[in-house]
Image (spheres, rainbow, N blue to C red):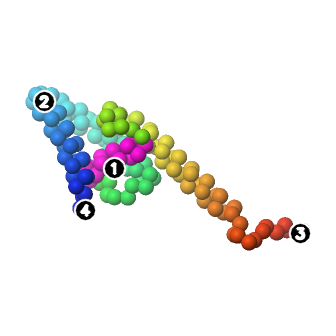
Amino acid sequence: MMKSAADRRQLARIQAAIDAHEAGLTPEQRAREKARLVYFAKPEAAALDSMKNVLRRLGVQPSLDDHGELWLRLWAAARHAGFSEEEFWRLTPRKLFAVLELKAQEREQKAGESQRSRGKLIPAGRTRRRRRW
């Protein structure tokens, strides 16, 4: 899949932030972080699947299996929800998921209301007839 120039710039900024963080770590700190990531990987995989599901419910269609694409879409969803760039990076994934889950529920509720109201519309020029029993 071809990414736009803006997508590539955003991914480059994310990668630069990760590289800067890793550059400041000692080998011992890197080993501890790696062990911690392995320990949390199993529950994180389930959380990641839940996050992908919420993004799909929000209408995100591109492949979410690409890690960079997933984070780009999370960032875009958070920005659309009203978070600043700084607020996005300060959020924990759990807090971000909670907000996006509410947005998905709100979207689904609006879609349901729209469908129900469409079913009640009467075509122009017609009136409802009362049934006689």
Q: Position of residue 104 (x, y in %)?
A: 48, 48
Give the residue type at disc 4. Met
Judged from this view, the residue extending furthest toward the left is 27
Instruction: Determine which residue is flagged by label 2.
Output: 24
**Marks 3 and 1, Cα distance to the nearest angstrom?**
56 Å
Horizontal arrangement in the rendering, residue 14 relative to residue 23 (left or right): right
**Category of crowding for the residue at label 4, using alpha-carbon neighbours closer than 10 angstroms: few (below 14), some (14–19), many (at least 20):** few
Q: Amino acid at mark 1?
A: Arg
| Badge 2 or badge 1: first in the primary sequence | 2
Q: Which residue is mark 4?
A: 1
Q: For this rendering, which residue is in front, 83 or 132?
A: 83
Residue 70 on image: x %, y %:
31, 49
The quadrant of the image that shows the N terminus is bottom left
Element assignment for label 3 = loop
Q: State which tag comes first along the sequence, 4 or 1.
A: 4
Sequence order check, earlier mark of 4 and 3: 4
Q: Secondary structure at mark 1?
A: helix
Q: What segment carries the magenta color?
A: 66-81
Residue 126: horizontal and vertical position, in percent?
75, 71
Residue 98 appears in the figure: yes
Residue 6 is covered by the magenta coloring: no
Q: Are marks 2 and 4 in contact (CB under 8 Å)?
A: no
Q: Is residue 46 visible?
A: no
Q: Say which of 20 and 9 sits in front.
A: 9
Q: Which residue is mark 3?
A: 132
The percent coordinates of residue 127 (x first, y second) are 78, 68
